Image (cartoon, helix red, strand yellow):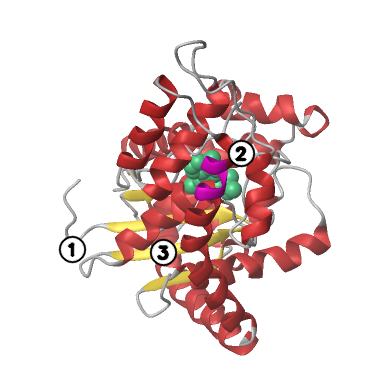
């Protein structure tokens, strides 16, 4: 997509705990890349309201939502260039999500694969909040008239819903909401360390946290399943494919090819691969962890970043909400 003066970017991460490599490669790296572009406006929020759509602990949420802001700052998001804020502090998100629900059928929402997956995962918590998750996300994006959204590939169905909401709102009420696109990174799908599915905070053993030490990273990698390691004898297991994908993401495509030819030839020594991979991952995370400590030591600065971000976000959000309400006969 061509980046122009009218490009606006929004993304967010739920406050469910420490960020992991999936969040970093699939979302944060895209945010960092787009923040570099002088011409465009970038809004990055902590999706703390989205956090209540699945079971959560109140005290942990209080802490985690602030920790995500610290993670953003540690990763290099710059409050001078990007608006960093907490979703719950800009009430317009909730208001717009409700207005959007007037153009979306219950059936469309119930058939979303992301909704079905979460209901399977939390059968006791098939709530209206969960059903409305994609509409809240549409409100997050469209309040800022964002047309580019750096998120992982798992979010594509929600971006599609957002486009559909924008189209319907424009048709029915004559609003002028954009139809956003996902901004994809090389790590748009980071697999689980367990060999099945994606890396996810809710699946223990699947992820590496951005705050893990080198030893912790290696320990987690050691748990990752492999195989006999000789391609002539077996087809490559999903566990090994996933490890090679991480090798490519952290050490480059050449390194991956090296391991692939070893696989076909002598076989891979997985102990050595995992040690090398742990070193490469930690080399990328170490500067983030050091910056994290600096921001933890400056709570006042973090408060100021949030306050300034919320003020800026609210002003833009209010304007869009007023426009939409006016068109809907509620102005
Ligand atoms: P969540 O933790 O579900 O709020 O996700 C926050 C962001 O991280 C979203 O943009 C997701 O698409 C992205 N993300 C989460 N897990 C992964 C993964 N395993 N691979 C790539 N992106 C991911």
Which quadrant would the C terminus be assigned to in this image?
bottom left
Pointer 2 local density, CA inside 10 Å: few below 14, some 14–19, many at least 20: many
Which label belongs to residue 43? 3
Task: Kindly state the secondary structure of the residue where label 3 is placed.
Answer: strand
Out of 182 and 110, give the one closest to the viewer.
182
Say which element carries label 2: helix
Give the camera-side residue of 164 and 15.
15
Count neighbours of disc 3 (C-alpha within 10 A) and say few if under 14, some if 14 to 19, many if 20 or more.
Answer: many
- Mark 3 CB in 8 Å range of ligand 1? no
Hey, which quadrant is residue 269 in on the image?
Answer: top right
Callout in the foreground (2, 3): 3
Measured Cα–Cα span from mark 3 to mark 1: 15 Å
- Mark carried by residue 132: 2
> Residue 133: which numbered mark, if any?
none
Give the residue at x 63% y 63%. 211
Residue 68, given in percent of the width and then of the height, sits at 60, 64
Relative to 228, is 5 above or below? Answer: below
Q: Is 59 above or below relative to 236?
A: below
Q: Does residue 276 show up magenta in the picture?
A: yes
Q: Which residue is mark 1?
A: 5
Q: Which residues are magenta?
A: 272-277
Residue 328 visible in the shown view = no
Q: How far apart are the alpha carbons under marks 1 and 2?
A: 32 Å
Q: Tell me which secondary structure the magenta stretch mostly adopts.
A: helix
Would you say the beta carbon of the disc 1 residue lies within 8 angstroms of ligand 1? no
Provide the secondary structure element on which disc 1 rests: loop
Q: Say how many tags the image has.
A: 3
Residue 53, given in percent of the width and then of the height, sits at 69, 44
User: Is the Cβ of the residue at disc 1 closer than 8 Å to that at disc 2?
Assistant: no
């Amino acid at each position: 997509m061509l980046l122009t003066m009218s490009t606006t970017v929004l993304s967010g991460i739920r406050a469910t705990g420490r960020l992991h490599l999936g969040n970093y490669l699939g979302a944060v790296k895209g945010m960092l890349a787009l923040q570099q572009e002088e011409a465009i406006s970038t809004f990055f929020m902590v999706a703390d309201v989205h956090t209540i759509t699945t079971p959560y602990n109140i005290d942990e949420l209080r802490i985690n939502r602030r920790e995500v802001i610290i993670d953003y700052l540690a990763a290099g998001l710059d409050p001078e260039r990007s608006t960093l804020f907490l979703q719950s502090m800009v009430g317009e998100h909730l208001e717009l999500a409700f207005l959007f629900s007037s153009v979306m059928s219950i059936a469309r929402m119930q058939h979303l694969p992301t909704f079905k997956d979460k209901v399977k995962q939390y059968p006791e918590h098939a709530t209206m909040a969960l059903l409305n998750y994609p509409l809240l996300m549409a409100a997050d994006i469209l309040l800022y008239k964002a047309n580019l959204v750096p998120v992982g590939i798992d979010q594509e169905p929600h971006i599609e819903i957002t486009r559909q909401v924008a189209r319907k709102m424009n048709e029915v009420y004559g609003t002028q909401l954009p139809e956003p696109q996902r901004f994809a990174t090389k790590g748009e799908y980071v697999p689980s360390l367990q060999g099945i599915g994606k890396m996810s905070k809710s699946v223990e053993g699947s992820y590496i946290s951005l705050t893990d030490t080198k030893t912790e990273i290696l320990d987690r990698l050691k748990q990752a399943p492999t195989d006999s390691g000789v391609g002539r004898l077996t087809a490559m297991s999903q566990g090994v494919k996933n490890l090679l994908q991480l090798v490519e993401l952290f050490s480059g495509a050449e390194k991956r090819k090296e391991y692939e030819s070893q696989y076909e030839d002598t076989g891979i020594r997985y102990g050595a691969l995992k040690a090398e991979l742990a070193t490469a991952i930690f080399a990328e995370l170490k500067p983030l962890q050091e910056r994290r400590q600096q921001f933890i030591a400056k709570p006042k600065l973090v408060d100021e970043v949030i306050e300034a971000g919320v003020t800026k976000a609210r002003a833009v959000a209010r304007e869009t909400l007023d426009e939409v309400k006016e068109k809907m006969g509620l102005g």
